[in-house]
Structure formats: structure tokens, C-alpha cells
Image (cartoon, rainbow, N blue to C red):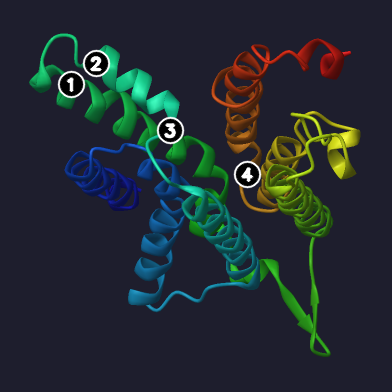
């Protein structure tokens, strides 16, 4: 697992260099999902190099990961216009002791921290990629016999991804709507039932991939991966940051109620 992990560190180091040249650390958000593809590609490449067959579960879970990664990177990238306020705040705080201290702090506490977190969350898929065996799939008359965990897991992933895509699109349309009576916060579609349907979808799809991992040896040990992403989105970098900003708006009390 050393080289797969180093691939993420290398990618984040390159991103750090680019972001300092552009004076905009927000590009790391585009790289976030794409960095999940690198270690799995390294593992698959190593298997192919020694002639080890790649089973259908491995291809399927990596296809799911690729769809999620590219869609999320595109969604974030096309909206990017300037450095996000979170990174502006971090830049100001990290620069108080000089530019050298800023570079050191930014490298380790933004870029390397995200590298570590991506590996932790990605460990579920990496475990499947590394340990899923061709013998776990049996071809019978051209049909694949999957374990129950594969059906359930990929089903949960699909539902979660759909929630994320639809939620993001509905929010984008709400923001683009020029109707002065639309209100600050989106309250239609999935947003009528959840304050953060896109985050719900993100959590669900990672739990789905964990269920798929139950079909490989000791796949259950990767349960920390969906737990970490759930805690991050609910209590650290997702919901709290958005709602802290939203609470400053006059409509928030009514929306929260």
C-alpha cells in the first residue's frame, strides 16, 4: 500500500505548488475526489503487471468511484471563480507569522491533511481493489452471481449518487433563479425534505461502498471509512460551516423552523 499512498501525497504536493502559484487554495477541492482514483489505479496496475486477473467486483467498484469522482470534481470546478472564503480565512491566519510559516502550515494542515483524510475515506475501495478475488464471481450461463452485499451496496451507492446529483442540480437552479420572491434558501425538490440532501447522498454512497467491501476478506474492518466521512460532513467541514454562514441571514430562523 506504500506506493498507492505516496501517489496521493505526490498529487497533493503538486496541487499545493500550483495553488501557491495561483494564490488560490480552492483548487484542492477539485482534486479531492480525483485523488481517490490514484491509489486504486496503482493497485490495479500492480496486479496487471504480475498477471493477476481483476474480478468484476473490483472493476465495478472502481467504476462507481470514477463516476463519483469525476462528477464531483466537475461540479466544483465549473463553479470556481475565486478562492473560497474558508481558505481566505486560513490564509490570513496562517500568514500572521510570515510567508514561510504560511507555506509550511498550508502544506501540512491543508494539503497533507486532505491527503490523509482521502486515504482514510478511500480505504474501503482500496481494500476491495487489493483483496477481491476472481473466485468471488462465478459465471453461470453468462450471468454473474453476486453476493448479497454487492447488490445492496451498489444499490445504496446508486441511490446516494442520485440524491447528490439531483440535490446539487436543484440548488444550482435555485441560485440561478432571478425571481426576487424565491427566498435565500432552497425549499423545493429534495430540499423540501432535507436541509442537506447532497450531503445525505454523499454519506449514503460511501456506506454503500462499505457494504460492497463486506464481500471481501475482513472487509468489515473498513467501517471507519464511512464513519469518518459521515462525521466530517455532519460535524466538521460540511453542515457546520454552511449553517454557521447561513445563520447570519435574516431568513434563517424561519427556515430552521
- Lower sequence index among marks 3 and 2: 3
First in sequence: mark 2 vs mark 4: 2
**What residue does disc 1 label?**
102
Q: CA distance from mark 4 to mark 3?
A: 37 Å
List the single residue furthest toward the front: 180
Relative to 234, say whether 218 is above or below: below
Residue at the spot 48% in from the left edge and 35% down from the top edge: 120
Q: Is residue 162 left or right of residue 108?
A: right
Whole-percent x, y for residue 169 in the image? 72, 52
- Mark 3, residue position: 84
Quadrant in the picture for residue 202: top right
Residue position for label 4: 219
Tell us which disc is closer to us: 3 or 1: 3
Q: Secondary structure at mark 2?
A: helix
Considering only order in the chain, which callout, 3 or 4, is on the residue closer to the N terminus? 3
**Cα distance in 3D space between marks 1 and 2:** 5 Å
Residue 118 visible in the displayed image: yes
Name the residue beneath numbered marker 2.
94
Please tell me in which quadrant of the rendered image residue 135 appears: bottom right
Question: Mark 1 or mark 4, which is nearer the start of the sequence?
Answer: 1
Q: Residue at x 28, y 50 (%)?
A: 11
Q: Check disc 3 and report its element: helix, strand or loop.
A: loop
Does residue 81 appear to the left or right of 205 in the view shown?
A: left
Amino acid at each position: 500500500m506504500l506506493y498507492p499512498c505516496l501517489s496521493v501525497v505526490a498529487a497533493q504536493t503538486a496541487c499545493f505548488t500550483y495553488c501557491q502559484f495561483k494564490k488560490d487554495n480552492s483548487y484542492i477541492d477539485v482534486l479531492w475526489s480525483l485523488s481517490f482514483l490514484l491509489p486504486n489505479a496503482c493497485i490495479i496496475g500492480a496486479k496487471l503487471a504480475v498477471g493477476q486477473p481483476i474480478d468484476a467486483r473490483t472493476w465495478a467498484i472502481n467504476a462507481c468511484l470514477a463516476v463519483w469522482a469525476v462528477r464531483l470534481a466537475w461540479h466544483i470546478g465549473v463553479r470556481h471563480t475565486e478562492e473560497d472564503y474558508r481558505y481566505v480565512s486560513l490564509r490570513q491566519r496562517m500568514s500572521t507569522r510570515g510567508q514561510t510559516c504560511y507555506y509550511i502550515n498550508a502544506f501540512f494542515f491543508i494539503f497533507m491533511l486532505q491527503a490523509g483524510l482521502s486515504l482514510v475515506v478511500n480505504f474501503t475501495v482500496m481494500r476491495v481493489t487489493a483483496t477481491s478475488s476472481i473466485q468471488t464471481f462465478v459465471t453461470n450461463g453468462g450471468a454473474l452471481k453476486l453476493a448479497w452485499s454487492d447488490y445492496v451496496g451498489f444499490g445504496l451507492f446508486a441511490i446516494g449518487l442520485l440524491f447528490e446529483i439531483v440535490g446539487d442540480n436543484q440548488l444550482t437552479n435555485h441560485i440561478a433563479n432571478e425571481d426576487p420572491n424565491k427566498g435565500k434558501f432552497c425549499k423545493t425538490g429534495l430540499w423540501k425534505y432535507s436541509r442537506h440532501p447532497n450531503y445525505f447522498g454523499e454519506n449514503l454512497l460511501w456506506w454503500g461502498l462499505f457494504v460492497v467491501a463486506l464481500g471481501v476478506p475482513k472487509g468489515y474492518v473498513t467501517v471507519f471509512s464511512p464513519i469518518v466521512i459521515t462525521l466530517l460532513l455532519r460535524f466538521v467541514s460540511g453542515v457546520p460551516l454552511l449553517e454557521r454562514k447561513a445563520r447570519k441571514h435574516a431568513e434563517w430562523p424561519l427556515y430552521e423552523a
